[in-house]
Amino acid sequence: MVPLLGKTSGKGMNKAETVAGSVFVIIGIFIVLEAVKFPYFVEGVPGPGFLPLWVSGGMISTGLVLVAKGVWPHLAVHEEITWPEAAGWRRVGLMLGALAVSLLMLNVLGFMVVTTLFMAVVVFGLGIRSWWMLATVPLAAAVGLYVLFAVWLRVPLPKGILGFF
């Protein structure tokens, strides 16, 4: 296994984490400045400013954590980060392929079918081989996401060939 670049040994500042964190914070602030130009809610549902504002908050938070870890390395748990082995790359490829197929089939099959199948591939890719888990977790995740977006936030989702949900 090959160690990743950017880690420092000793007690000095980790420049890679500090720079990456700073870039995240700067981009996050830029997104916030642009997102506030759009309405947060429109007629009681999330507007065009909703998602960018939350994403930028996550970026700024992540960036601040990286900067803190880079400047004060004693705050972080240190372990050597290595490149994944072939099995790890296969899992990544499986999940990226499932995501690509899901995006292509979303309008045809609909949100519930595609989300359930995608989550099943992800759960399988993470190494879960229990048929009970492969049947219940993806379906529960799809129903939960449907309730969150379609019911609570009133976001229209693709119905697909089934014509419901």
Image (tube, helix red, strand yellow):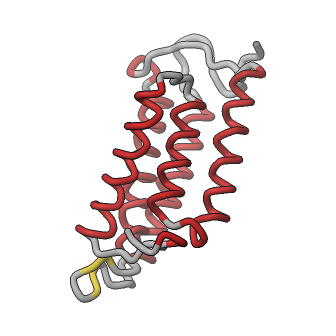
Q: Position of residue 23 (x, y in %)?
A: 56, 52
Q: In the rendered image of this protein, does residue 66 appear above or below residue 61? A: above
Query: Which of 164 and 54 lies nearest the eye of the viewer?
Result: 164
Q: Residue at x 38, y 21 (%)?
A: 75
Q: Quadrant of the C terminus?
A: bottom left
Instruction: Pinpoint residue 58: horizontal percent, then vertical percent.
Output: 40, 52
Question: Number of marks in the image?
Answer: 0
The one nearer the camera, 3 or 104, is: 104
Q: Quadrant of the N terminus?
A: top right
Residue 136: percent from left, percent from top: 38, 37
User: Front-most of 91 and 138?
Assistant: 138
Q: Is 89 rendered above or below residue 33?
A: above
Q: Residue at x 40, y 80 (%)?
A: 48
Q: Is residue 70 above or below residue 38?
A: above
- In the picture as drawn, the residue positioned furthest to the front comes out as 162
Q: Residue at x 42, y 61 (%)?
A: 56
Q: Quadrant of residue 65?
A: top left
Q: Is residue 112 above or below residue 19?
A: below
Residue name at image x 77 percent, y 16 percent: 2
**Residue 96 placement, left or right of 55:** right
Residue 78: x and y, percent?
Answer: 50, 14
